[in-house]
Amino acid sequence: MRRSLTKNFIIRKKHEIDRIFRQGQSVSCKGMRLVVIENELGYDRFIVIPAKKYGNSVQRNRIRRQAKEIFRLCDNRIMSEDNKTGRDIALVVYPGKVSSYSLLESDFHSLLDRVAKK
């Protein structure tokens, strides 16, 4: 069992990130926004983007690590049996409400449920 996200599961290229925000569907709650679009890779990829004014580098890196761990643990929840294609998922985190791991996890799951209903 893998303990961290491999390079294949992380979005890094600017043109891919731009495509997610241009064409993806978005849901949000207080403190974060989730943008999702399908890809042709067959597996889900993920990126966490703290807002520009989100704390210092320690806080930004911590929220990235926590969100990647939540994504890794709920990977089977995201991928459904009828969905043969993968998805690119971008999580934008804003300063303020998200202060603990459990709050981040519950908000992330609620956003995923809202995306699945659309």
Image: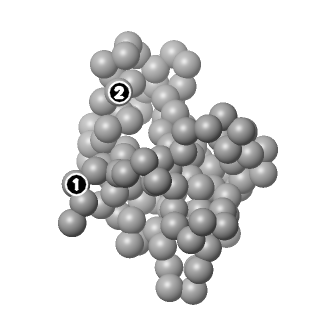
Tag of residue 61: 2
Q: Quadrant of residue 92?
A: top right
Kindly tell me whether residue 72 is visible in this rendering.
yes
Residue that protrudes farthest toward the bottom in the picture: 82
* Up-down relation of residue 114 to residue 62 (above or below): below
| Disc 1: which residue | 3
Q: Quadrant of residue 71?
A: bottom left
Q: Where is residue 44 drawn, in percent x and y? A: 51, 62
| Residue type, label 2 | Asn
**Pair 2/1: label in front:** 1
Q: Where is residue 28 drawn, in percent x and y? A: 59, 47
What residue is rendered at 36% in x and 46% in y? 68
Tag of residue 80: none
What residue is rendered at 67% in x and 58% in y? 37
* Up-down relation of residue 57 to residue 62 (above or below): above
Label 1 packing within 10 angstroms: few (<14), some (14-19), many (20+) = few
Task: Name the image quarter holding the N terminus.
Answer: bottom left
Secondary element type, mark 1: loop
User: Marks 2 and 1, Cα distance to the nearest angstrom?
Assistant: 18 Å
96 displayed left or right of 72: right
